[in-house]
Image (cartoon, grey):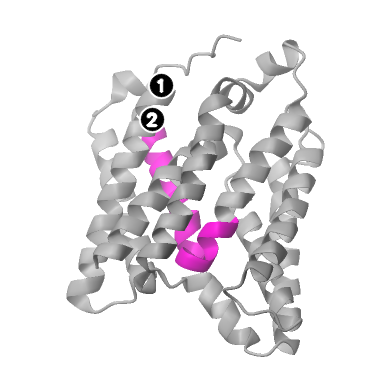
């Protein structure tokens, strides 16, 4: 179980941070939608006879993810807007899901591919795969570190970013592209459900206890690592499917965090406002 544990920690490292932006932007289902676009790409590749684990299949998934990223960047509106952005994201998810089912019906092993995309196969991950994906996630992390002032400002202070004259759609597209690359690489390993959980649940826990971005990063990392470790332990001891076991444990950790918050833990820190990065 060491390889799956390390894989979980690597995934938590990048996804729990990206999840903070997702929660701040109030686009909760953007990960689920982009993951479904990646899944659609992989099923389309299967329809054309492409091996599921090949580089060509990855290119197909990334191409469809880029289409989703472009749609989300172009449809972002100022303030509430006439149509909520979350509605567009939900529509993309539903249409991509339906299209994946239609394509899977004509593709060889299409039903198996849909099942694999949902549940993932993190229990079978190998060390070379961990190293390769870890290096890619590290590159994405470096990109976000270098551009952190822009990304944080646009996610947490969009009105101020507009006042400064920044091209919101350009930075949105760049964010969603990096986000989409991470999702595209993660879905074949962890599955749609676990990737979504790793993005949203640690970030929600962090928002319960703080508004300081640095503290939220540490809290989300810690919560994600704890839930992953406990989920793997339960899966090993009870002989349960690994992905669903980890997802359920994330839910229990979130419940425990909610109880602690209700008891007053972190009440003062949660009232802090995330500071605007200097330009």
Q: Residue at x 32, y 68 (%)?
A: 245
Q: Residue at x 71, y 87 (%)?
A: 107
Q: CA distance from mark 2 to mark 1?
A: 6 Å
Q: Main secondary structure of the magenta part?
A: helix
Residue 255 rendering spot, x and y as whole percentages: 31, 49
Q: Tell me if residue 18 can be seen.
A: no
- Residue receiving disc 2: 216
Q: Residue at x 29, y 53 (%)?
A: 227
Within the image, what quadrant is residue 215 found in? top left
Residue 212: image tag: 1
Membership of 205 in magenta stretch: yes
Asked which secondary structure carries label 2, the reply is helix
Q: Residue at x 61, y 10 (%)?
A: 279
Q: Is residue 86 above or below residue 2?
A: above
Residue 169: image tag: none
Q: Is residue 170 above or below residue 67?
A: above
Asked which secondary structure carries label 1, the reply is loop
Within the image, what quadrant is residue 151 found in? top right
15 horizontally vs 59: left or right? left
- The residue stretch that appears in magenta: 184-208
**Badge 2 density bin: few <14, some 14–19, many ≥20, Cα 10 Å:** many
Query: Could you say which is closer to the camera, residue 217 or residue 76?
Result: 217
- Asked whether the residues under the numbered discs 2 and 1 touch, taking CB atoms below 8 Å apart as contact, a structural biologist would say yes
């Amino acid at each position: 179980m060491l390889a799956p544990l390390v894989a979980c920690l690597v995934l938590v490292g990048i996804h729990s941070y990206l999840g903070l932006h997702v929660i701040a932007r109030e686009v909760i289902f953007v990960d689920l939608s982009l993951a479904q676009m990646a899944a659609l790409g992989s099923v389309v590749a299967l329809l054309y006879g492409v091996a599921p684990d090949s580089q060509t299949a990855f290119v197909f998934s990334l191409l469809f993810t880029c289409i989703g990223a472009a749609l989300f960047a172009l449809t972002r509106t100022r303030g509430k807007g006439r149509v909520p952005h979350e509605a567009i994201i939900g529509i993309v998810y539903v249409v991509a899901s339906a299209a994946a089912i239609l394509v899977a019906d004509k593709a060889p092993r299409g039903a198996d591919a849909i099942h694999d995309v949902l549940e993932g196969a993190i229990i079978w991950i190998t060390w070379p795969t961990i190293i390769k994906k870890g290096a890619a996630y590290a590159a994405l992390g470096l990109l976000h570190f270098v551009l952190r002032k822009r990304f944080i400002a646009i996610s947490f202070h969009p009105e101020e970013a507009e006042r400064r004259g920044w091209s919101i759609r350009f930075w949105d597209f760049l964010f969603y592209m990096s986000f989409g690359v991470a999702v595209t690489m993660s879905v074949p390993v962890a599955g749609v459900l676990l990737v979504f959980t790793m993005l949203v649940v640690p970030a929600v826990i962090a928002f319960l206890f703080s508004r300081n971005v640095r503290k939220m990063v540490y809290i989300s990392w810690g919560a994600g690592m704890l839930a992953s470790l406990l989920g793997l332990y339960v899966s090993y001891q009870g002989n349960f499917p690994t992905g669903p076991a980890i997802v359920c444990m994330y839910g229990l950790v979130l419940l425990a965090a909610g109880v602690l918050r209700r008891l007053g833990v972190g009440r003062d820190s949660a009232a802090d406002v995330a500071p605007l990065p200097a330009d």
